[in-house]
Amino acid sequence: MVVVMQERATPDQVERVVAQLVEMGFDVHRSTGALRTVIGAVGGKAGDPRLLEVLDGVQEVLRITEPYKLASRTFRPENTVITLGDVRIGGDEVVVMAGPCSAESDEQVEATALAVKRAGAKILRGGAYKPRSSPYSFQGLGEEGLRMLRGAADRHSLYLISEVMDISQIETIEKYSDILQVGARNMQNFTLLRELGRSRKPVMLKRGISATIEEWLLSAEYILAGGNMNVMLCERGIRTFESYTRNTLDISAIPVVKQLSHLPVIADPSHGTGRRDKVAPMARAAVAAGADGLIIEVHCDPDHAMSDGAQSLFPSQFDRLMAELRIIAPAIGRSICVEAVARRGWSR
Amino acid sequence: MAEKRAVSVIDELRRRIDEIDERLVDLLNARARCALDIGHEKRTAGMEVYQPDREAEVLDHVQSINPGPLDDGAVKRLFERIIDEARRLERLADLQ
C-alpha cells in the first residue's frame, strides 16, 4: 500500500507511520518530496489500512492489491468457464436463462419453458422460494414449485436455476436445481455463502441492492474459499436516486468485474429495470458490454403473474429480443444460441 | 571534429562513473554488513529493529557534511533509500 502524508506532517509523524508499517511486516520505501512525504509499503500481510489512516499526519492510505484473492484475476488470469453438459457459461457463447419469476402452476411453467426453449434459452429460471419485500406477498410454492420446474426443464432439455434463501433449503433445492441462485438480499448472508461453498453445484451470486463491486467480490470469495469454484456473478441493478426504474442496472459493472475477476458475469435486465418495455434495451446493452449471460423473466401470461408481472416479457417479446441479440453478439466476437437460428430463422 | 572530441570526453567520464559505481557498491555493502551486525546485536539485546532517532541522526549527519553539488534534500532522499534497504536486510536476517 501507499501512505500519503499530509503537507505539514512532522518527521515524528512520518516515523510513527514507518514504525507501524515495520510492525505490520512491510518493507518501507520513503519518498520525501518538497511538500509531502509518500511512503510505499510492500510485502507484509494484508493489514487493516485503518490502522494507518488513524495516525496523525496521514492524508490517505491507498491499497494496491484487492482484499479478495480467489475471485481476483491476479489469482487466475484465464476466464472461469462453468460447464453444465453442453452449456458453457463464461465461454464464447452468451448463455440465456429465462422463465417465470415464480413457479405458479404446472400449466404456467410448462407453457413458459416451451416458449423460452423455442426462442433459444439454455437454462430455465424460476423461483419456488421467493424473497418478497412484503410478508403478505406471494411467497412461492416451495418444493412443489421445484418439482414443476424440474419437470418442465427435463421435458425441454433445459437446465434449471432456482433461488436459495436459507441454509435449510439447500438440500432440497440441490435435488432439483442445476444452479443455485443467491438473491440480492442475501448477498451478505455469510453463513449461507459459507454453506454454498461446500456445495458442488454452481452458484449464481446476485449483487446486493447497495453493494459495491468490492463487497460483491468479497461475497463471492466466501463461496470460493469454501472450495466451490463454480461461481458466477449477476448484476441486477443497484439502488440509486432515480425512481423511474425499479433499480439502476449498472452496465459499467460488467466490464469492471470482467477486468477484476475471472468469474462469469450475468446481467438481469428484468430486476435491473422493473419494467417490461425497458428489459430488451438493457439486455442488448448488457450483451454489448460483455456479459457472459442474461437472466430474463418471461411469463406466458404476465398480466396475471403472481409476482413481477410488470417486468416479465411476453414470449413474443423474448423471441424478438433473442433475434436482436444474435446480431449483437457476433459484433463483439461472441455467439448466442446459433442452432436455434438455423431452425427458426431470424425473423419473429 | 568537435563531435569526436566530445565522444572521447564522454567515454572517459563514463569510465569514471563506472569506477565510482564499483566503489559505491563496495561501500554500500560494507555499510550493509555493519547494519547486519548491528541488527544481530539488537536481536540479542532484545531491541527494536526500527530506531527512528538513530535514522534521523544518520540523515542529519550526511547532510551536515554535504559539500554539494547535490543539495541537502537530494542527499537526504538518497540516504533514506539506503536506510530503507538496510532495514529490509535486518528484517530478512531476523527471519532466518
Image (tube, rainbow, N blue to C red):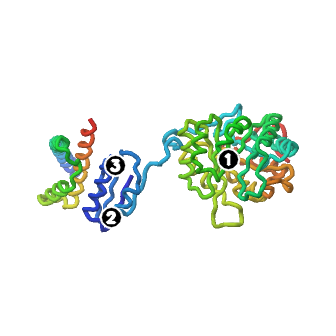
Q: Mark 1 against mark 3, which lies toward the viewer? A: 1
What label does residue A332 carry, if any? none
- Name which residue lies at 34% across and 65% down: A6
Compared across the picture, whether A106 is left or right of A126 comes to right
Identify residue type, mark 3.
Answer: Met
- Rendered position, A343 above or below B7: above
Compared across the picture, whether A265 is left or right of A113 comes to left
Chain bearing tag 1 is A
Please tell me which of labels 2 and 3 falls first in the chain. 3
Quarter of the picture containing the C terminus of chain B is top left
Q: Position of residue B91 (x, y in %)?
A: 26, 43
Please tell me which of labels 1 and 3 falls first in the chain. 3
Labels 2 & 1 near each other (Cβ < 8 A):
no
Can you see residue B29?
Answer: no
Q: Position of residue A15 (x, y in %)?
A: 26, 58
Identify residue type, mark 2.
Answer: Gly
Compared across the picture, whether A211 is left or right of A321 comes to left
Circle 2 sits on which residue?
A57
**Do badges 2 and 3 share one subunit?**
yes
Circle 3 sits on which residue?
A24
Quadrant of res B67: bottom left
What label does residue A165 carry, if any? 1
